[in-house]
Image (cartoon, rainbow, N blue to C red):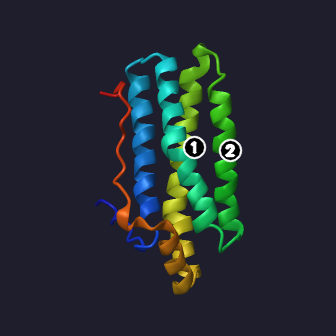
Amino acid sequence: MDPKPIKRSETIVKFSREHHFSLLFSWKIRQGLKKNIQASRLLQYVHYFENAYLRPHFLEEEEVLFAPMQDEMVQRALKDHQWVYGQLQELYQVPEENAAEALTAFVDKLDEHVRYEERELFPHLEKTLSEQQLEEIGRKLNTADADPLKDEYEDEFWK
């Protein structure tokens, strides 16, 4: 039996959509590795994704969603963000012969982080933050006019 989808508060559902996009990013990298795509092509996509989606997502989580609460669970997510930033810098300098292993480790950790936030942190925040705090988060996110996420990267190596 498939697990039931997680019901997310409308005020923070934007983050869950972005998380799905991150999991798709990881899948694309794994597909590229399976197809023995040159590491430099995969790393170009990582760089694109980092700047177009990952950094803005992390920044918004940190400044809007995590700001009202700085407990242990939020601290874990913040540490994960710092790990991701550090790992990205290392990825861009890894020798070609070690790139597949480094990319695999990176997307595995990114997936683990996303699943932590979705399965543990977000339910915790939804339960712990007041309705007023959640509404304020929703106002700050202003998701009413948000465009749906699209990956417009031209080199579709994963296909």
Is disc 2 in contact with disc 1, using a CB cutoff of under 8 Å? yes
Q: Between residues 133 and 42, which one lies in front from this camera angle?
A: 133
Few, some or many residues within 10 Å of mark 1 (<14, 14–19, 20+): some
Examine the rendering and report whether any part of residue 113 can be seen.
Answer: no
Q: Residue at x 65, y 51 (%)?
A: 80
Query: Considering only vertical position in the picture, is 35 above or below 13?
Result: above
Seen from this angle, which residue lies furthest front? 145
Query: Considering only vertical position in the picture, is 55 above or below 120?
Result: above
Task: Please tell me in which quadrant of the rendered image residue 61 appears.
Answer: bottom right
Query: Considering only vertical position in the picture, is 106 above or below 69?
Result: above
Quick check: 31 left or right of 52?
left
Q: Position of residue 68 (x, y in %)?
A: 65, 74
**Numbered badge on residue 117:** none
Instruction: Answer with mark 2 or mark 1, whichever residue precedes in sequence.
Output: 2
**Residue with the mark numbered 2:** 83
Q: Quadrant of the N terminus?
A: bottom left
Distance in Å between CA atoms under marks 2 and 1 = 9 Å
Q: Position of residue 77 (x, y in %)?
A: 64, 58
Q: Residue at x 39, y 34 (%)?
A: 28
Query: Considering only vertical position in the picture, is 9 above or below 112?
Result: below
Q: Between residues 33 and 64, which one lies in front from this camera angle?
A: 64
Q: Residue at x 57, y 36 (%)?
A: 106
- Amino acid type assigned to the residue bearing label 2 in the image: Trp
**Residue with the mark numbered 1:** 109
Q: Between residues 58 and 1, which one lies in front from this camera angle?
A: 58
Q: Secondary structure at mark 1?
A: helix
- Amino acid type assigned to the residue bearing label 1 in the image: Lys
